[in-house]
Image: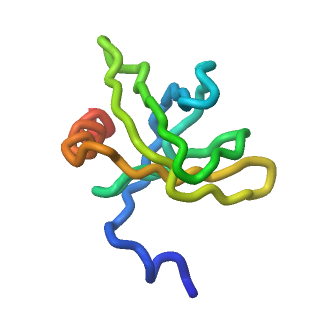
Amino acid sequence: MDQTLKREYIRHPALIPIEYKTQKKPEKKEDFIKNISLGGLCFKSSDCLDIGDRLSIKIPIINPKFQFHGNVVWCFKRQGFYEIGVKFLVKKDVHRVRMIQQI
């Protein structure tokens, strides 16, 4: 089945740098958001993350850095990288991230 038929929310393309840490691996990683929706976001990573991993995510281009939290809901291997799907833990965070994208 086509993934777009399963989507609960429309995804909006984005290219926003992020820094993130997992509870399991506290070292900071840097990647880019690929797209964002009302439910969460997708980013590309060189690392595979486990479903259920809790992430602390910062957007470093904003001063002070904007921080929010999410859970990994899927991880797909692509050619040379992984796409990670993250569900926002606090719904209002999506609006804050979208405002940053507009800036």
Tell me the residue at 31%/12% (across/down).
Answer: 63
Q: Nearer the viewer, residue 89 or 98?
A: 89
Where is residue 79 drawn, in percent x and y? 79, 56
Where is residue 10 drawn, in percent x and y? 33, 67
Tell me the residue at 34%/25% (across/down).
Answer: 67
- Where residue 1 sits, quadrant-wise, is bottom right
The correct choice, above or below, for 93 with respect to 75 in the image is above
Outermost right residue: 80
The correct choice, above or below, for 78 with respect to 61 in the image is below
Colour convention of the picture: rainbow
- Where residue 78 sits, quadrant-wise, is bottom right
In the rendered structure, the answer to whether residue 23 lies left or right of residue 69 reads: right
Outermost bottom residue: 1
Where is residue 102 drawn, in percent x and y? 27, 39
Image quadrant holding the C terminus, namely top left
- Where residue 76 sits, quadrant-wise, is bottom right
Q: Nearer the viewer, residue 70 or 78?
A: 70
Tell me the residue at 65%/41% (across/down).
Answer: 45
Total marks shown come to 0
Outermost top residue: 64
The correct choice, above or below, for 12 with respect to 3 in the image is above
In the rendered structure, the answer to whether residue 88 lies left or right of residue 90 reads: right
Tell me the residue at 61%/31% (across/down).
Answer: 24
Where is residue 35 drawn, in percent x and y? 45, 52
